[in-house]
Image (cartoon, coloured by chain):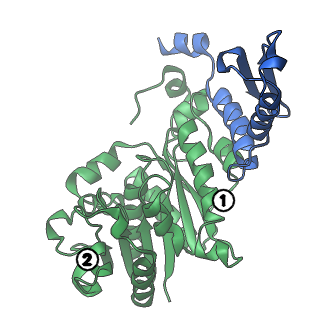
Chain colours: A blue, B green
Amino acid sequence: MNLFRFFSKGQSAPAARERLQVLLAHERAATGDIDLVNKLRDEILKAISKHMQVDDEKVSIKMERGAQVSTLAVDIEIPFDAGKKAA
Amino acid sequence: MGKVIVVTSGKGGVGKTTSSAALGAALAQNGEKVVVVDFDVGLRNLDLVMGAERRVVYDLVNVIQGEAKLTQALIRDKRVETLYLLPASQTRDKDNLTPEGVEKVIAALKNAFDWVICDSPAGIERGATLAMRHADIAIVVTNPEVSSVRDSDRIIGLLDSKTLKAENGERVEKHLLLTRYDAVRAERGDMLKVDDVLEILSIPLLGIIPESMDVLRASNVGAPVTLADTRSAPALAYFEATRRLKGENLPITIPGDKRGFFGKIFGRKAA
């Protein structure tokens, strides 16, 4: 039984190791609350809201933290008359 | 002047109290004068693990508030005469721990003992930061498991920024104590290995405590692991860690890896 499991399941420790290494690299870089990716996200939204009313449901933000590179994807639906609504 | 050790981890349930009691007792068994201080105000357990729960009269908060003298609150161990316990309060709020009060108590203990071992509460709040505040040495207790390693990393960051030593531009000496280690599962690839944890946390290793029934057995009867059965695997591991703490340069042994070929193939239940 044990022999069977040994071959069927594969090792989980390498996954734990890899996930920790990526996560901690980011957590260590984020000293205090200054996390670059979070900061960029906030400032991008702020810049956009200057020109149009940002509808929360029309904004999708995706973050992917990688070992070497992180990506931040901000996807915003801009309605045709958005410019007129801005105060 | 005694040395102040904080036993800390961030995460709860990884073995801080067990390790505080075991290391404290092991040092005292070698003739050193030791006091183990419970900083977990409101959830004290060191008294229970050390078998002194029925002898608590005064506690750390009483001393800080000036309601009792330090000598009245210290409980002397019945088995090892150079081992003392300063219990935490069970009923008071942890806001009663003031930085000034803790500083006074630690200063007085340093004068009277060779080792002052501070058993930190889990978390990163007041109790935990005050427990590490005056430390010369930090023992970071970690299980080979993702959440424990992450929290240990966070605690290491705090040790480098929030302690008195760090604020004075000095460094707290940090050591890793890997607990509940199962060499068989690590070898099988289902548990982080010693080297994995060491590489991620990059602080020197003080010892590896094997997962063992002896730990629960010892707490059941209210004896530090090193006193309950001096020949048990975890006791031997704690004795080794104690010698390293005192500066000896011992090779690291991975406990519990005694099985032969058949054992490795067919496995066995955790001891």
Q: Which amino acid is tagged 1?
A: Pro
Q: Going 77% across and 20% down the picture, which residue do you hit?
A: A85
Q: Going 44% across and 58% down the picture, which residue do you hit?
A: B236
In whole angstroms, how far apart are the C-alphas of marks 2 and 1? 37 Å
Residue B81 showing in the rendered view: no
Q: Going 56% across and 47% down the picture, which residue do you hit?
A: B151
Residue A27 showing in the rendered view: yes
Neighbour tally class for label 1: few under 14, some 14-19, many 20 plus, Cα within 10 Å:
few
Where residue B157 sits in the image (x, y, percent)? 65, 57
Disc 2: which residue: B62
Image quadrant of residue B188?
top right
Q: Going 46% across and 67% down the picture, which residue do you hit?
A: B131
Where residue B257 sits in the image (x, y, percent)? 53, 40
Helix, strand or loop status at disc 1 = loop
Disc 1: which residue: B204
Compared to B89, does A57 lie above or below? Answer: above
Are marks 2 and 1 in one subunit? yes
Where residue B232 sits in the image (x, y, percent)? 37, 53
In what quadrant of the picture does the C terminus of chain B appear?
top left
Q: Mark 2 or mark 1, which has the lower sequence index?
A: 2
Image quadrant of residue B54?
bottom left
Compared to B143, does B241 lie above or below? Answer: below
Compared to A51, does B174 lie above or below? Answer: below
Task: Tell which subunit mark 1 falls on.
Answer: B
Is B65 on the left or on the right of B207, as rendered? left
Compared to B202, does B243 lie above or below? Answer: below
